Amino acid sequence: ETSGNVDIQNAIGATGHVFARIRPGGSGEVQVTFQGKLQTMQAVSSSEETINTGDFIKVVDVIGNTLQVERIKPGNEEE
Protein backbone atom coordinates (compact mmCIF):
# COMPACT_ATOMS: atom_id res chain seq x y z
CA GLU A 1 0.00 0.00 0.00
CA THR A 2 2.12 2.93 1.23
CA SER A 3 5.21 0.87 2.16
CA GLY A 4 7.19 2.42 -0.72
CA ASN A 5 6.54 5.99 0.41
CA VAL A 6 8.93 7.81 2.70
CA ASP A 7 7.26 9.77 5.50
CA ILE A 8 9.87 12.41 6.31
CA GLN A 9 8.34 12.89 9.78
CA ASN A 10 9.74 9.44 10.65
CA ALA A 11 13.23 10.94 10.44
CA ILE A 12 12.78 12.93 13.68
CA GLY A 13 15.00 11.37 16.32
CA ALA A 14 17.11 9.51 13.77
CA THR A 15 20.89 9.86 13.83
CA GLY A 16 23.36 9.89 11.00
CA HIS A 17 26.24 11.93 9.61
CA VAL A 18 26.83 15.00 7.50
CA PHE A 19 27.45 14.22 3.83
CA ALA A 20 27.89 17.85 2.67
CA ARG A 21 28.84 20.58 5.19
CA ILE A 22 26.03 22.64 6.70
CA ARG A 23 26.92 26.32 7.11
CA PRO A 24 25.06 28.77 9.39
CA GLY A 25 22.06 30.08 7.48
CA GLY A 26 22.61 27.58 4.71
CA SER A 27 21.86 23.97 3.96
CA GLY A 28 23.85 20.84 3.33
CA GLU A 29 23.15 17.13 3.10
CA VAL A 30 23.00 14.41 5.71
CA GLN A 31 22.68 10.65 5.55
CA VAL A 32 20.28 9.15 8.08
CA THR A 33 18.62 5.77 8.37
CA PHE A 34 14.86 5.74 8.89
CA GLN A 35 12.08 3.49 7.67
CA GLY A 36 14.77 0.83 7.26
CA LYS A 37 16.66 2.67 4.52
CA LEU A 38 19.69 4.95 4.36
CA GLN A 39 18.41 8.30 3.07
CA THR A 40 20.41 11.28 1.81
CA MET A 41 18.42 14.40 2.67
CA GLN A 42 18.81 18.17 2.57
CA ALA A 43 19.38 19.57 6.06
CA VAL A 44 19.86 22.78 8.00
CA SER A 45 21.44 23.33 11.43
CA SER A 46 19.20 23.93 14.45
CA SER A 47 21.84 26.36 15.75
CA GLU A 48 24.14 28.92 14.20
CA GLU A 49 27.13 26.56 14.10
CA THR A 50 28.79 24.98 11.09
CA ILE A 51 28.39 21.21 11.03
CA ASN A 52 31.23 19.67 9.05
CA THR A 53 31.26 16.71 6.70
CA GLY A 54 31.54 13.51 8.73
CA ASP A 55 30.13 14.99 11.96
CA PHE A 56 27.43 12.92 13.63
CA ILE A 57 23.98 14.50 13.83
CA LYS A 58 20.51 13.94 15.23
CA VAL A 59 17.33 15.02 13.44
CA VAL A 60 15.33 17.36 15.70
CA ASP A 61 12.63 18.64 13.31
CA VAL A 62 11.37 18.65 9.75
CA ILE A 63 10.64 21.82 7.77
CA GLY A 64 8.93 20.95 4.49
CA ASN A 65 11.30 18.46 2.85
CA THR A 66 14.35 19.63 4.81
CA LEU A 67 15.63 18.07 8.02
CA GLN A 68 16.65 20.29 10.93
CA VAL A 69 19.61 18.69 12.69
CA GLU A 70 21.92 19.22 15.63
CA ARG A 71 25.51 18.06 15.92
CA ILE A 72 26.16 15.27 18.39
CA LYS A 73 29.24 16.41 20.27
CA PRO A 74 31.93 13.80 21.01
CA GLY A 75 31.43 12.35 24.47
CA ASN A 76 27.66 12.93 24.45
CA GLU A 77 26.85 9.56 22.92
CA GLU A 78 24.81 7.29 25.14
CA GLU A 79 26.78 4.29 26.37
Image (cartoon, grey):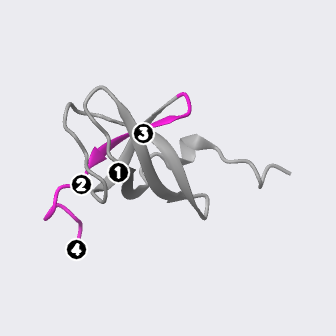
Indicate which label's residue lies in the foreground, 3 or 1: 3
Task: Confirm whether the magenta stretch covers residue 50.
Answer: no
What is the crowding at mark 3: few (fewer than 14 residues within 10 Å), some, or many (at least 20)? many
Q: Are marks 1 and 4 in contact (CB under 8 Å)?
A: no
Coordinates of residue 26 in the picture (x, y in percent): 34, 29
What is the crowding at mark 1: few (fewer than 14 residues within 10 Å), some, or many (at least 20)? many
Q: Which residue is mark 4?
A: 79
Say whether residue 67 is left or right of residue 46: right
What is the crowding at mark 2: few (fewer than 14 residues within 10 Å), some, or many (at least 20)? some
Q: Which mark is residue 72?
A: 2
Q: Earlier in the sequence, mark 4 or mark 2?
A: 2
Q: Earlier in the sequence, mark 1 or mark 4?
A: 1
Q: Are marks 1 and 2 in contact (CB under 8 Å)?
A: yes
Q: Which residues are magenta?
A: 64-79
**In the rendered view, would you say 73 is above or below 46?**
below
Say whether residue 52 is left or right of residue 12: left
Residue type indicated by callout 2: Ile
Q: Earlier in the sequence, mark 3 or mark 4?
A: 3
